[in-house]
Image (spheres, grey):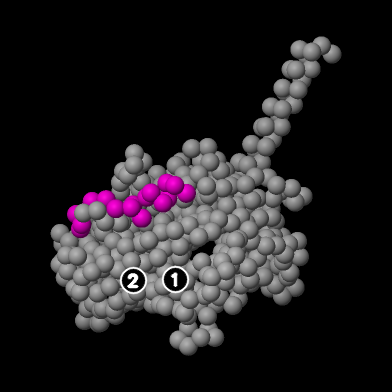
Amino acid sequence: MTVIARFITLSCVLLALSVITLAQKNDAEARAAVAGAAPHFATKAPLNVKRFQPQLTISAGTVLDATTGTAIGTGSGQSNVQINSAPAPSPVPIATFDGSFVAQGGPSAGGVFPFTMIGGQPFAGKTTTIPAPISEVSVTLLNADGSVLTTVPFDPFETLTLQSPNFNATNYRSGTQVQFADAVQRAEFFNSMAANWHTVLQSSVVNRVNIVVPRFVNVQLSPGNIIQARSYFTGTAADGKTFVLMLNLVFDFFFGNEVNNEINLGNFTTDALHMTLFPNTYLFALNANKPDTPGTCCVLGFHTFFFDPSTSPATRWVTQFVSWISPGIFVNPSFLDVTGLSHETSEAFNDPFLNNITPRWQFPGVTAPAGSKQSRVCQGNLETGDPVEVLANVSVPITLRSFTYHPQTEALLPWFEMGTSSSAIDGAFSFPDETALTSSAVPCP
């Protein structure tokens, strides 16, 4: 064989291997799932911190319960954390204020609904600074034989995230040189707040960890009934970055253990709003009948809190999971970059302990059948991002340092009151896009 012939043969082999590798990283199931999905944000019940261990790998013997997500079998592995040798501080709760509103319409008209929000009292003024420790999570995906398929790092998105409107100030109608969540909260209380009232996030990256995700995981549907399910699927976004669809049971295992890690290390403290940030990682439900294909997709984030039941009152760590969103993944192009981070941060500000009840409201544009209890038709909580996530345009463009971000428009407190008018800025029901919701919520039958 001539040198030229050998060169051509080798080139063809390398090209074939590249095509195979690319195919492995672009599952047809992933593209089909995102094409048919309505990206959304989940509700996550409070989590007992003692349920989890600082473990960031899943062994072959691990079995996850399909209902609770609890690991039934054994696991092994360590986080690549750096130990914090400083003594643990005394638990100081996150700064909050209490208030209430009166429902103006619907079956709950006249009812009083109390709430607790992050920050200081609006009428009292002053700036409340909330620590925002960030754990950045990269994802290593394994092939069926245990070899590494690829690692999806968070690093490409770190600087963009830290420079985003969530942590950096710009101008809004509700204030000049303010952060995004502060701007939304000021819009809610614009006509009752002191002019110098602010709630500011002080971000810091406290850890960078890597989780190792097997291609398959064992799931117990019922005692004695264990199936093997795909843990993840992958695809490629328009910017060339890999996106990951991860089985929610597998994600919950890693999420709980990683938060436990950070609490044990002293990186997550009770006075803070904690963030675990992932690179293009979205969650799907188990498809028990076809466990080699994704179930309902795609969750982009949630907020919750971890608690220690051995303390009285129970110690709480307010925490959120959010993924960066690269372009071209979802059919609705307004879900992009920090849409999820802004959604969950504003919701954590407005409902940090998941107990701010409101009159039951319908999602905009969705008609609820009488007596409906379906969670995606009606809700009854102060989750300010959820009413907007079903709209055609969920975000607003904000340019900082030559990058255009897309934080999500939020429903304001008066929207949940179901009245004919709003006490918020400009009489608005949403912000920053005041045209997104032009009237208050429609009550659920």
Q: Which residue is mark 2?
A: 118
Q: Quadrant of residue 354?
A: bottom left
Q: Where does the N terminus fall, quadrant-wise?
A: top right
The numbered mark, 1 or 2, whose residue comes first in the sequence reads 2
Between residue 231 and residue 239, name the one nearer to us. 239
Badge count: 2
Q: Is residue 286 visible?
A: no
Q: Secondary structure at mark 1?
A: strand
Nearest the viewer among 56 and 217 is 56
Q: Position of residue 167 (x, y in %)?
A: 36, 55
Q: Is residue 10 above or below residue 426?
A: above
Furthest-bottom residue in this view: 312
Which span of residues is magenta-colored?
Answer: 158-175
Measured as percent of width and height from the top left, residue 77 is found at 70, 62
Q: Residue sitting at 70 percent across and 47 percent down?
A: 148
Residue occupying image coordinates x 75% and y 73%: 224
Residue at image x 29%, y 53%? 169
Q: Amino acid at mark 2?
A: Ile
Residue that numbered label 1 is attached to: 318
Question: Based on the displayed image, in which of its 4 quarters is residue 264 positioned?
Answer: bottom right
Say whether residue 163 is magenta: yes
Q: Is residue 157 above or below residue 312?
A: above
Name the residue type under label 1. Val
Q: Secondary structure at mark 2?
A: strand
